[in-house]
Image: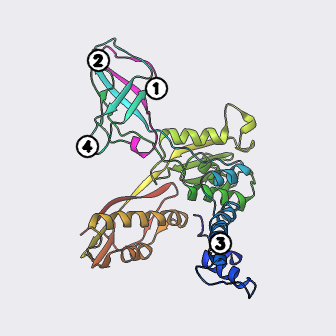
Amino acid sequence: MQPEFTKPDFLEDNTAEEIHERMMEDLPTDIDDMPGGFPFDFTMPAALEKAELIEFFLVRAVMIAFPQYSWGEWLDLHAKQINLYRNPETHATGKLEIKGIPGTEILKGTVFCTAATDDSPSVDFTTDEDCIIGEDGMAMVKVTAVEGGPESALKAETITMMDEANDGIISVTNPEPTAGGKEEESDDDLYDRIALEYENSNTYLGNDIDYERWAKDAGAGECIVVPAAQGPGTVKLVLIDTDGQPADESLVENVYNHIVSPEDRSRRLLPTACASLICVAAETKAINYKCTGLLFDGTVDLEQIKDDFSLAVKQLYKEAKKEGVLRYNDVRPLISSISGVEDFQAFLINDAMENISFAKEEYPQTGTVDFS
């Protein structure tokens, strides 16, 4: 995460009033410097312009000079200097089960969608390939969301409509949730990758930290490195997405292709001596939280407290995974730190007041959050 910017000392004491006061002090003693006089009114616009130049433009110029304080396109330029690029938003993918008249052809690019509601518009998906409804009256086809972002990650049984009618199709649905659909990489996450790149000086030796960095460059949120997974010369990467969920098929493929580059060996990152790379989605260990006797001041509701807790505990998972244990005494204080919470009676993790341990390829995942 990017640190907070502190304005340099040499830019202090430069408000319009302070600048104008210095200008009045520099006037010859025989010239009127009283408010309302010609010299006073004539110099104030210059003081205002100089203050804006120092307190806004010069401050921003200092900030964009360093990746720690830069943002947007300026941070992208810092990343480009070390051959890093901001991960774009991704489009969710999934499969549709289509029922209809045998022999009906469904062309690549056919649009299916969800039903619009008062709160949100419909979400469109297009077929990735041509398909034909079989003799059993069914077809399965891969689809990709037209618009990217988290809004394209949908629950099962929600894509149920056709954009244009087809008499040969009786019904359509997605039997499983669509996977993927992420926002564009944030400034904080891109800066973390920039900092990691500088800290490790681009060793490209195939150290654990190299694999972690390469996986994140391809869009992974976290990466567990398992050396010699199937004997010498093999490395296994267990992948988590940026939401803390097991990586979907598309992310697993992206990480593998980024590191191995099977189509262009000149871009290969995997050390030549490494026989093979295995990329898989992580196995998650569900962790359920229960808090009773919760007392809050009414400035926030219970759902907001649960959301704040879920976000806070998620920040602990990375360190917990490194240590192989999520400590009860690290999680319990999070509740008291949430805005609006005054007190509570009991707090349990998986129905006990105990630490939670993880296997090598397990990653913590929040299950139920039962606060009352």
Q: Residues within 10 Å of mark 2 (few under 14, many from 20)?
A: some
Secondary structure at badge 3 equals helix
> Circle 3 is placed at which residue position?
42
Question: Which of pointers 2 and 4 indicates the residue nearer the eye?
Answer: 4
Q: Residues within 10 Å of mark 4 (few under 14, many from 20)?
A: few
The residue shown at (36%, 41%) is 154
The numbered mark, 3 or 4, whose residue comes first in the sequence reads 3
> Circle 4 is placed at which residue position?
118
The residue shown at (31%, 43%) is 120
Question: Which of pointers 1 and 2 indicates the residue nearer the eye?
Answer: 1
Tag 4: amino acid: Asp
Q: Decide: marks 3, 4 in contact (CB < 8 A)?
A: no
> Circle 2 is placed at which residue position?
137
Identify the disc placed on residue 66: none
Calculate the distance from the C-alpha at mark 3 to the C-alpha at mark 4.
57 Å
Calculate the distance from the C-alpha at mark 1 to the C-alpha at mark 3.
68 Å
Q: Residues within 10 Å of mark 3 (few under 14, many from 20)?
A: few
Instruction: Write the start and end of the magenta stretch as one range.
Output: 129-153
Displayed quadrant of residue 23: bottom right
The residue shown at (60%, 54%) is 190
Secondary structure at badge 1 equals loop
Tag 2: amino acid: Gly
> Circle 1 is placed at which residue position?
128
Q: Residues within 10 Å of mark 1 (few under 14, many from 20)?
A: some
Left or right: 314 with respect to 170?
A: right
